[in-house]
Amino acid sequence: MTQIERGANVHQSKGHLRSTVPLQPLVAHPSPQKDPSSQWFLKRLTLVAVAALSTAIGITVALVLPLPTGSALNQKGAQPSDKNLWQSGFQYQVGRPVNILVMGIDRVPGAKSGSKELFNGRSDTMLMLRVDPTDDSVKLLSVPRDTQVDIPNVGVTKINDANVRGGAELAAKTVSGVLNGITIDRYVRVDTEAFRELVDQLGGVEVYVPEAMSYVDKTQKLTINLAAGLQTLNGNQAEQFARFRHDAYGDIGRVQRQQTLLKALLKRVTNPAVIPRLPGLVSAMQKYIDTNLSVEEMLALTGAGRQLSQGNFKMVMLPGRFSTPTEFNASYWIMNPEGRDRVMKQYFNIDPTTATSDQIRSANDLKIAIQNASSKTDAADQLRRYLVKRGFSNVYVASDWSEKQSQTQIIAQQGDLTNAETLKGLLGIGRVEADSTGDLESDLTIRLGDDWTTPAN
């Protein structure tokens, strides 16, 4: 197996991101010989990989595509069809942890389809993705678009302004500065039009819509009209769900819904019935992508997904709070430095650059929300009393979760996986969810399922 082994940061040169050291292939070619068939094979695989990396959500899809092994060339060396290509395999490996900045770019008025101008807008979505072969895991950090930052040579503003001010280079530099100097190895920029087409190509995605969503977003030029309940959303509807912000949580609610869609797409793309549709992504998606990932790197990343289990896919949102109306002239997401340091250590293995007050915390000191998703109307209050008796002083009951669940979830809302596991051990039930879809005010959210029964003592 050939491997990704290089570790180089990126900078911009004549409009394109390049390595700060002389470029060397992250992966070696399996063979030094290049014949027309092999060149065609790599070209087509490139398109497949790019298609899989087609959106901020699509990059996650790329990491879980169940591609079987085999040869893409037939007995006579003829060029195979797209269908046969998806029955082929490759032997590239990710040889070290890799950090990729993924940005979904807002629509740019007047930009032509397939043009470079498509990627000059503000970042509507910003994700820091880490693929780690040491434990076969993928970690994903969502950075809210309204996060307050000091952009070099620009000043204090929202982080979504970095790309429009200085492209992928400035965006990467800004994100690295916010996230304790993390090395950003590669970037992927995606036109937001890609998301709608991706979902349609996959035949829709099943999502639980917790409440009716209906209004006209003039800023986004988007009409949103979704009923509540479990349903299969097409591309247009999925975009409505992802971009809805007409509630008390604004941009942060959008981050939560994007994480919900990520999980739903992971489930969808591993459905055997969906596999025949994947080749259709090839020609449809390439016009929406700008990336400095090479052919071999994309193949290695896609291959890494073949070993990924759902338990090794972890998501978290950058901890913080909403600014108050009197703090600034604009509304911001104000990052919590202590929470940021904890997330960067637990998810990215990066130590704090400066001392913070966040020491190892006891689960008893955490703010714990309880959402009742069981069929027992008093279950949440029963659990609250149970936890208070055991020394948990900051426990509260949040609004019931409208979708009933059989299994309890302990959601690491602020990325504290260690204490989430501790709480799971105390309860003796449920599973830890590494995402930020719980109550926004909590450190941990317990979403009670029907497996919870109040202990006798």
Image: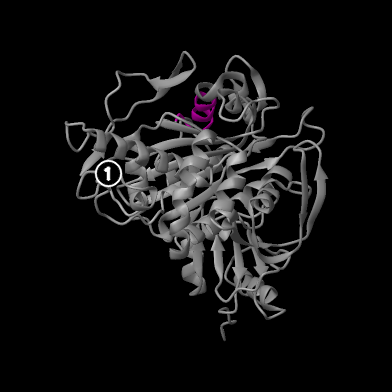
Residue 372 falls inside the magenta stretch: no
What residue lies at 75% left-to-right and 34% top-to-bottom? 331
Q: Main SS type for the magenta part?
A: helix
Relative depth, front residue between 351 and 3:
3
Q: Quadrant of the N terminus?
A: top left
Task: Characterize the local packing of mark 1: few (<14), some (14-19) or many (20 or more) Cα atoms within 10 angstroms.
Answer: many
In the rendered image, the vertical position of residue 407 relative to residue 324, given as above or below: below
Q: Quadrant of the C terminus?
A: bottom right
Q: Position of residue 27 (x, y in %)?
A: 26, 35
Q: Position of residue 89 (x, y in %)?
A: 28, 50
Residue 301, located in which quarter of the rendered image?
Answer: top left
373 horizontally vs 324: left or right: left
Q: Which residue is mark 1?
A: 93
Relative depth, front residue between 23 and 353:
23
Q: Which residues are magenta?
A: 171-181
Q: How many numbered marks are there?
A: 1
410 horizontally vs 235: left or right: left
In the rendered image, the vertical position of residue 217 relative to residue 28, given as above or below: below
In the rendered image, the vertical position of residue 128 relative to residue 201, given as above or below: above
Whether residue 4 is visible to the viewer of this picture, yes or no, is no
57 horizontally vs 295: left or right: right
Q: Position of residue 216 (x, y in %)?
A: 82, 45
Amino acid, disc 1: Gln
257 horizontally vs 140: left or right: right
Residue 180 falls inside the magenta stretch: yes
Which residue is the extreme one toward the bottom?
456
